[in-house]
Amino acid sequence: MSDPAALFLTRPDDWHVHVRDGEMLRRVVPATARQFARAIIMPNLVPPVATTELARQYRERILAAVPSGASFEPLMTLYLTENMSPDEVAEAKASGMVHGVKWYPAGATTHSQFGVENISRCDAVVAAMEEHDLPLLVHAETPEFDVDVFDREAVFIDRHLVPLVARFPRLRLVVEHLTTRHGVQFVRDASARVAGTITVHHLLLNRNALFAGGLRPHSFCLPVLKREEHRLALVEAATGGNPRYFLGTDSAPHRRRDKEAACGCAGVFTAHAAIELYAEVFESAGALERLDAFASFHGPDFYGLPRNTQRIRLEKHPWRVPDCLGNGDDAIVPFRAGELVKWRLVVEERSAPARVPSESTARFQCRQEPSS
Ligand code: DOR
Ligand code: ZN
């Protein structure tokens, strides 16, 4: 596949995304729905999506924001709290629309204050997840202040995940947004019930991006970007064909004023160009033929869901990302703002023409435009 001008892929899914709520939700859902058939929706709202009933209501709000003519299935998750009961796990699984429970260590990231201080207090819930085969999705970073921020993933894995998988060997576990060689190795060496998602910003950037000519708040996310050696380990994992690694953007929109602040929020918005950016990574690694599996097969296989059958087409047609989406302080500054993206998602194939947005509709959703 040397320097192709076009690329056909099975329509991908995003196995980790934040779409927020309210006005922000209405602004960002179209970008995800344009590219992805399904997405695992993170539950870190305030208050958190901690029950099946709240997930059901949130799902309805997401569906209401999907542009008409588009097909998009939100795959809901619950926010793990120390108060969750094992019955909630049974109810979540029986609902058919909840596909995981998210473990945020309390204090580790955005809206994690409702999260878990001591995972052993959740033993009965984790046992129920193992029994019902409902995956545990983990933000694998220790929040401890005395642990260096660049070591927090590795320390968390050693202190918490190694013991957890030993105690619950049948638990399905997804280590979200891997950022280190250590994380990649943990997944690779664990049982087939352990997988990891990889974001496109961690594949494209190393920690130098945070300080390129000055402080760069729009490259700040958690887990924070790491050294080049870790980025290379992620690229090797993503492009290597191992089914235990799959696409999860962790696209996390924040308003410009909340990013460009004295204490700026963590999160990078990539939903406007995610699959195109992943294509850049795979192309640079000489592995474009493996993008389909990473983006479209490994995730559903792990979650026990059918693979998508629709197709999408990417063209080698550089386009410039807008400087911002929306206006003023409320704008979202997208990844690669003002710069070129090499690949362009063009049009979806004939198999389900009524269910996908036209190119013009899709592009409109991502253009700079007055916020309503
Ligand atoms: O960068 C991040 N942003 N990492 C997270 O874990 C949460 C996310 C958000 O919700 O903003
Ligand atoms: Zn996230």
Image (cartoon, rainbow, N blue to C red):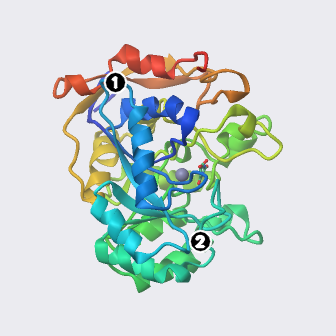
What secondary structure is found at the residue carrying circle 1?
A: loop
User: What is the number of the mark on residue 68?
Assistant: 1
Of circles 1 and 2, the one toward us is 1
What secondary structure is found at the residue carrying circle 2?
A: loop
User: What is the number of the mark on residue 116?
Assistant: 2
Of labels 1 and 2, earlier in sequence is 1
- Is residue 285 in view? no
For the C terminus, give its image quadrant.
Answer: top right
Residue closest to the far right: 262
Label 1, ligand 1: CB separation under 8 Å: no
Residue closest to the far left: 351
Residue 222 shown left or right of residue 17 in the figure: right
Nearer the observer, 262 or 62: 62
Residue 200 in percent (x, y) is at 49, 43
Residue 152 in percent (x, y) is at 65, 66
How far apart marks 1 and 2 lie (CA) works out to 38 Å
**Which residue does the image show at 22% across and 47% down from the upper left?**
307
Type of amino acid under label 1: Ser
Which quadrant holds residue 317? top left
Residue 149 in percent (x, y) is at 71, 62
